[in-house]
Image (spheres, rainbow, N blue to C red):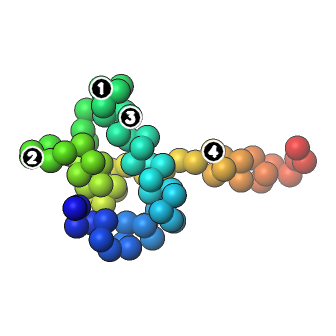
């Protein structure tokens, strides 16, 4: 098991387990399906270990559609 997943540090960093799972899923797709390059050295790590380490090192961060919707509300318009 990946040690970082035993503590709640990474969960709190992203704001919840669902957000962590969604970010891991998106990044895994980028690495495996889309052929994206890792942002850190692989050093024999699995894809999942690589993604978790990228999150811990702040190499990737979530951008959620809801965050963009909140910014759209700032202009004062309704709907």
Q: Secondary structure at mark 4?
A: helix
Q: Does residue 41 appear anywhere in the picture?
A: no
The mark found on residue 65 in the picture is: 4
Residue 15 in view, yes or no? yes
Residue found at x 35% / y 39%? 28
Residue furthest front in the image: 1
Kindly check if marks 4 and 1 are in contact, taking CB atoms under 8 A apart as contact: no
Tag 2 or tag 3, which sits nearer the N-term? 3
Cβ–Cβ below 8 Å for labels 4 and 3? no
Residue 11, placed above or below residue 77: below
Which quadrant of the view contains residue 53? bottom left
Q: Would you call the spot at circle 4 few (<14 residues within 10 Å), some (14-19), or many (20 or more)? A: few
Left or right position of 20 against 33:
right
- The image's mark for residue 51 is none
Q: Say the numbered circle drawn on residue 29.
A: 3
Image spot of residue 44 (x, y percent): 9, 45
Is mark 3 in CB contact (under 8 Å) with mark 2? no
Mark 2 highlights which residue?
43
Which label's residue is closer to the chain start, 2 or 1?
1
In the rendered image, residue 63, in percent from the top left (x then y), is placed at 53, 47
* Image marks 1 and 3: residues in contact by CB distance under 8 Å: no
- What's the distance in space between the residues labelled 4 and 1, CA to CA? 24 Å
For residue 3, above or below residue 30 = below
Q: Which is more toward the observer, 5 or 43?
A: 5
What residue appears at the point 71 percent right and 53 percent down from the top-left corner?
A: 70
Residue position marked by numbered label 1 in the rendering: 35
Alpha-carbon span between mark 4 and mark 3: 18 Å
C-alpha span from label 2 to label 4: 33 Å
Q: Nearer the viewer, mark 3 or mark 2?
A: 3
Q: Identify the mark nearer the N-term, 4 or 3.
A: 3
**Residue 9 locus on image (x, y percent):** 36, 72
Quick one: 73 or 19, which is closer to the camera? 19
């Amino acid at each position: 098991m990946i040690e970082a997943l035993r503590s709640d540090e990474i969960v709190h960093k992203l704001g919840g387990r669902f957000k962590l799972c969604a970010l891991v899923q998106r990044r895994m797709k980028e690495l495996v399906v889309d052929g994206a390059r890792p942002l850190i050295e692989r050093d024999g790590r699995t894809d999942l270990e690589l993604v978790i380490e990228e999150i811990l090192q702040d190499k990737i961060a979530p951008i959620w559609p809801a965050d963009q919707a909140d910014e759209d509300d700032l202009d004062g318009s309704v709907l």
